[in-house]
Image (tube, rainbow, N blue to C red):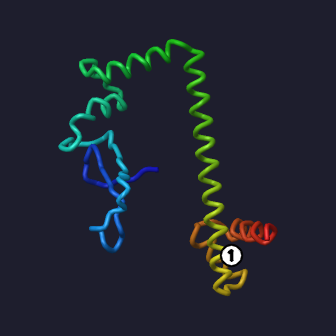
Amino acid sequence: MTTTYQRGLARYQFEFREKWHPEITAGDLRTMVVFNTKAQDYEHATEIRPFLDMICGTVDTKDKFIAAVDAEIQDIRADKQREARFMKEEIERRRELRKNREEERRNTILDMIKALESQGMAETQVVQTIATMQAISQAEAQKYYDQLVVAS
């Protein structure tokens, strides 16, 4: 997922707030932090600059944390079995993430179909609405509709 906030900040920090009353927070201390490796403004993120630089290929060995991370990376690269294991784990993690996203999307579409049908919408309208809202073909939307009908 690529998102551009167009401020050039190194770190963007978002809190969970009520949409119409932003003074009300979720109260669970959740925060989403997004790092920008191409930042121009490090005003609120000077401590992470060496890390973001390392991600971009510049290693500052004067920074103890960065030196330790770099040493670990070099150890992994030197041990071909360990590197292969890491790569295999990364591929598996991405595969699982993709599978979870697909399952989440499928469930969302099926829930949308149920909601549209509960409002009395005809099958053709439901399929057309799903295709439009999800930017998929009508044939694909029809498959989702048929899945729901078969499962019922």
Q: State the residue at coordinates (49%, 17%).
A: 77
Where does residue 93 sit, x and y in percent of width and height? 58, 38
Q: Is residue 65 left or right of residue 137?
A: left
Residue 6 found in image quarter: bottom left
Query: Pointer 1: what residue?
Result: 127
Q: State the residue at coordinates (33%, 74%).
A: 20
**Quadrant including the C terminus:** bottom right
Kind of residue at badge 1: Val
Q: Is residue 97 left or right of residue 74?
A: right
Where does residue 115 sit, x and y in percent of width and height? 63, 77
Where does residue 96 sit, x and y in percent of width and height? 62, 43
Above or below, 101 against 56 in this view is below
Above or below, 37 against 102 in this view is above
Q: Is residue 119 left or right of residue 58?
A: right
Residue 107 found in image quarter: bottom right
Q: State the residue at coordinates (46%, 50%).
A: 1
| Farthest residue, direction left | 43
| Farthest residue, direction front | 27
Q: State the residue at coordinates (23%, 34%).
A: 47
Secondary structure beneath dot 1 equals helix
Where does residue 64 sit, x and y in percent of width and height? 28, 20
Q: Dot 1: few (<14), some (14–19), or many (≥20) neighbours within 10 Å?
A: many
